[in-house]
Image: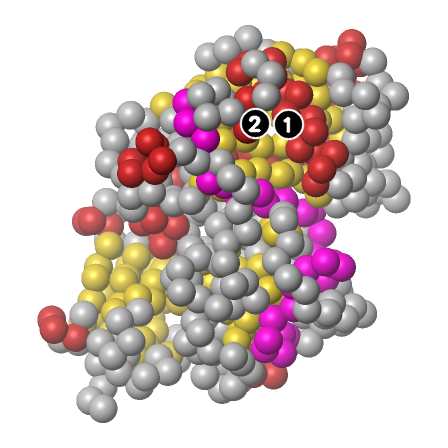
Amino acid sequence: MALRKATIVALLSVALVTEGAVAAAASSPSVARASTPAATTQPIPDGDGAIGTHTPGRPDTVAWESAADRGQVETFASATNIDVHKVDVVIATPSGMSRAAAARLIRKRDVDTLLSKVSSYWSAQSGGKVRFVRKTALKQIAVSKANCTSTSAIVRQVKAAGNQHYGSNWYTSSTRGPERREHLVVLYPFRKGDFPTSSGYGSTCGGTLGLGSVPAKASRNSPGGWSFNLFGGATGSQRSNRFTHYQYDKGVATLAHELGHNLGLRHSGLGWCDSKVADGRFRASGCGAIEGLDPLDLMGWDVAATGVPALSGALKRRLGVLPTYDQATVKASSGARTVRIAARHRKNSLRTLVNAVDPESGETYYVELRRPTTGHTFPYIGGLPWQAYTDYGIGYGVAVTRLAPGSSTWAYPGEHLIVPMGPVADRRSYMRVGETFTSRTGRLSIRVVKTSSTEATVRVTFPNP
């Protein structure tokens, strides 16, 4: 085991502009019943799922990597034939609860069902290249005054949990801790009454569902990591099938998301620029990233959704799990091209991702068709809940996204961002049939020719300067 450089990120269950989030230089979409917080320096953790803008100058990292491992870990989507990731699970006991009571809320069979669902999800998304299996005994901890109301309180429990598997002081050790493709998973039960429609909703951790570490580079050959996840609870435990209740079912999406961070994925959010140009330069002063504002992607924030959303093609590509035959790379050197693509979650003879390269800026724009998937529902299609933005809507259809480079001044490196469509006062996450998006250089155009429930046809052209 070698120490790794990692970012800590938190998953929140509500879409709120939170204090402490970093405001972007750009004017973000209009906020209803909330105001954008004052600009600050980079926080640790980022609000993973909280609606908040930021202007990073450098990654917010903690020292978690050794020189010996860096050469392998920091390659882009490192090649490996090993698909199994080992999971070490620890049940954390909340203050005021006995260890026996916590164990009754999170039983071995509950843990195994959770991991089976998460592993099946990741196997499907990765084409069988990523699976998660528990190969060590279930452990339990009871930290004095244990709670999850702050990052430091959560990390204190993560450290204690890791002691059970890796020995004391593993968190700062250069020789102990999760190995490559190994993940420490800490499970913490919801409070009684913490579920949607209840007055106690969000009371366990103040709205936080999970916290996880992110290594320096994304790859299915993950250097390992840790996560803290809300799972199980006194309310849901009363059901004969516990996974029909939010307190258990939500744990599937939470853990799948946090393990995505362990694989090196940042958030999926929205890139917002003041001007009519929706895809401003990543060093432009008039743009900002609204972190997590892409709830139709696994790495977006969570707000009242059920099930687990699909992973976007650009992120599959980052991990090295999207086959080349599933992508169409279109460059000016090969000329204009019309491409039929299947919905990103479908598997057939059609590709699911178009990588359109702007010949002047060199930036890649990722084009995919988003359609509803079995088991996942998002209740705010066409808009957002009252806590969020009034001039930006979310919907299914053809989406165009970008990945922020390391040189970006307003988005974290690797952050996956929607390019919004439509006028500034009424933007949306998708393109309509007949609509054309032209990049800021004017050298790349993407037009939606037609769509159906299962596929879309897009035309990529390269206008003369």
Query: At x 63% / y 49%, what residue is drawn?
Result: 44
Amino acid type shown at disc 1: Val
Image-based side of 186 in relation to 179, left or right: right
Image-based side of 368 in relation to 191, left or right: left
* Quarter location, residue 165: top right
At mark 1, the secondary structure is: helix
Distance, label 1 to label 2, CA atoms, is 9 Å
Magenta highlight on residue 85: no
Is residue 117 something one can see in this rendering?
A: no
Callouts 1 and 2 close, C-beta under 8 Å: yes
* Dot 2 crowding, Cα within 10 Å, few <14, some 14–19, many 20+: many
Q: Nearer the viewer, residue 211 or 446?
A: 211
Q: Position of residue 240 (x, y in %)?
A: 71, 18
Magenta highlight on residue 10: yes
Looking at the rendered image, the quarter that the N terminus falls into is top left
Q: Which residue is mark 2?
A: 171
With respect to residue 111, does 197 lie above or below?
below
User: Mark 1 or mark 2, which has the lower sequence index?
Assistant: 1
* Count of numbered circles on the image: 2
Query: At x 11% / y 71%, what residue is drawn?
Result: 334
Query: At x 44% / y 74%, what residue is drawn?
Result: 283
Amino acid type shown at disc 2: Tyr
Q: Position of residue 285 (x, y in %)?
A: 52, 79
Is residue 72 something one can see in this rendering?
A: yes
Span highlighted in magenta in the image: 1-29
With respect to residue 131, does 462 lie above or below?
below
Magenta segment main secondary structure: loop
* Dot 1 crowding, Cα within 10 Å, few <14, some 14–19, many 20+: many
Q: Which residue is mark 1?
A: 158
At mark 2, the secondary structure is: helix
